[in-house]
Image (spheres, helix red, strand yellow):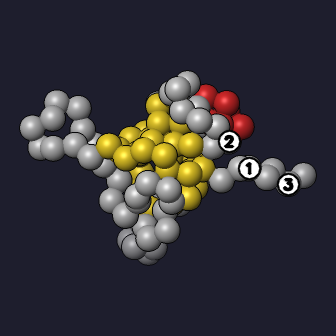
Amino acid sequence: MSRAFLPLQVVGFIATKRSDAVRGPLVKIRPDDAIMRLIEDGELVWVYGPRRHELAPVVYDDSLPKGGVVVRDLAGITVTEIVRLVKMDIEHRPVLTTNLA
């Protein structure tokens, strides 16, 4: 069974300054868009943009339009670009040993 999702478009970008109390990578998404992708509030996800990818926590925000996300402090992503969110799989990640490193 194929799960076709609507693409997520960046509708807002928050750039913080060094003096700001709250800063760092973050993705705001509608709860129904997140639940469709099995992403929970506060979960850490990979955010894939057109130029690079980064880890960021997810926060639910009901005020966003369907299919829209707001990102904070994520380099390489601008407004109107399409991004993809991928859950970070902590349980099945490979264990790096001296043989694999």
Residue at image location 42% in from the left, 44% down from the top: 12
Quarter of the rendering containing residue 21: top left
Q: Amino acid at mark 3?
A: Ser
Q: Name the secondary structure under disc 2.
A: loop
Identify residue for label 2.
Answer: 37
Eye-nearest disc, 2 or 1: 1
Read off the residue under disc 3. Answer: 2
Q: Identify the residue at image location x=68%, y=42%.
A: 37
Mark 1–mark 3 contact, CB under 8 Å? no
Q: Are marks 2 and 1 in contact (CB under 8 Å)?
A: yes
Crowd rating for badge 1 (residues with CA inside 10 Å; few <14, some 14–19, many 20+): few
Asked whether residue 25 is in view, the answer is no
Q: Residue furthest top?
A: 62
Looking at the rendered structure, the kind of residue marked 2 is Arg
Counting from the top left corner in percent of width and height, residue 58 is at: 47, 36
- How far apart, in angstroms, are the residues tagged by discs 1 and 3? 10 Å
